[in-house]
Image (spheres, rainbow, N blue to C red):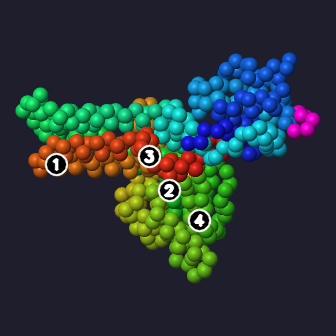
Amino acid sequence: MRTDTIAAIASGMTSSGIGIIRVSGDEAVPAVERITKLPGGKKLSEVPANSVNYGYITDPEGSHEIIDEVMVLVMRAPKTYTREDTVEIDCHGGVVAMKKILDAVLSCGVRLAEPGEFTRRAFMNGRIDLSQAEAVADIINAKSELALNSGVKQLRGNVAAKIRELRNVILGAAAEIEAFLDDPEHYGDVDFAGKLKPAVTGYLSEIDRLIDTAGSGRFISQGIRTVICGKPNAGKSTLLNALLGEERAIVTDVPGTTRDTLEEYLSLGGIPLRITDTAGIRDTEDTVEKIGVDKAVKSVMNADLVLFVADGSAVLSEEDTKILELSSGRRTIILLNKSDLVQKTGPEDLARFSSAPVIEISAASGSGLDALTAKIREMFLGGMLSSDDEVVITNMRHKEALEHARESLKSVLESIDAGMPEDFFSIDLTEAYQELGYILGEAMDEDVIERIFSDFCMGK
């Protein structure tokens, strides 16, 4: 890893009230000192660690004119984000001001940071493990309260603690076998296979439980792929607008208004939804509408959740039953819309064609949306994240490592059942231990680490 001094705009390249330029490395303080003017001629290198200092940033060239009035935070290693000397310049948040200050810092022999390099240094310097580093990106990219809470828990180390706990017991079992192989006479006639089998079965049970959370974890981190479907004029676009709290989709009394899919990301009661409003599904000769219908059908087939909107003020039609048949086999919630009007279709009518839960709503007034939120939470999360100690796997790299560890532990059981020598047990236990270590970033290939941090933003 490169250990030179780096800098970047940490607050994003958009105008805001405050801008932050972060500098990290051995030369952070001397470099920023060259362009900093503090009251009374004080030197930045003389200020206490973990102090905030008022002053000015000046142009390093020519007349040393003042660029901006700033607050300069000086933090000394190892008690910093990167465990390196770190300086943060809080300036006015205009794009021109931030860029000019960054250019001034870079002119003092500092290099522009690569994406994610500050967090990468925190990982390489041992302040956080790789799962915690990935949690930083999850927090930045969180689009719902659930995703944020999950990222914070992972950053606090709940995933790492569980993985370390599993690794410790697996390593202990492997070490005991190795000790036996080195000095069998000391252990006497010990039935290692009989002792090890229930222990490994327990390890597998715990890993299976973690892998089982990955389904809900994907929904938390990436959002539930949700499709609103139904026949024309059932109220699909009105429902989307109600969920978003804004007039996003065009709503008219003319059937077939929506001709294409309309995608939005929203948080419904803290639950992240990647939601798609579709064209009304029906047989049509209109070329453009037919393309929209085909897209709607494809969206239904790829959805995690189908919200089928039925018009309760109209008699259930053949189009409705065909759409219900299309959504068969997928997690579906039937929304019996227009409950504020005289009803011609009830839940009992829909029950004849589908076993999916039925919720009576009025998309126009918002009635029934709380019940919809509760049902989605029940269907997809099932109590996940109900406790601060709950460990949920939201990262697919972590899931893959767990699956590989599971295969290694299954090999241990197969060796036990086949009556193989104890050294076979030790080999597979060690492999499981190593696979779990990849979650924490131990013995990782450099290109894998490079790929993980390349997805981070520049100032993080």
- The residue that disc 3 covers is 444
The first of marks 3 and 1 along the sequence is 1
Question: Badge 4 is on which residue?
Answer: 261
At label 1, the amino acid type is Ser
**Residue in view at x 12 percent, y 33 percent:** 184
Residue 65 colored magenta?
Answer: yes
Question: Alpha carbon of mark 1 to alpha carbon of mark 4: how far?
Answer: 53 Å
User: For the point 30% across and 45% down, which residue is it?
Assistant: 431
Relative to 390, is 202 on the left or the right? left
Q: Earlier in the sequence, mark 3 or mark 4?
A: 4
Q: Nearer the viewer, mark 1 or mark 4?
A: 1
Determine the secondary structure under disc 4: loop
Q: CA distance from mark 3 to mark 4?
A: 41 Å
Q: Real-space Cα distance between discs 3 and 1?
A: 28 Å
Query: Which quarter of the rendered picture does the C terminus lie within?
Result: top right
How packed mark 2 is, by other alpha carbons closer than 10 Å (few <14, some 14-19, many 20 or more), is: some
Residue named by callout 1? 415
Three-letter code, disc 3? Met
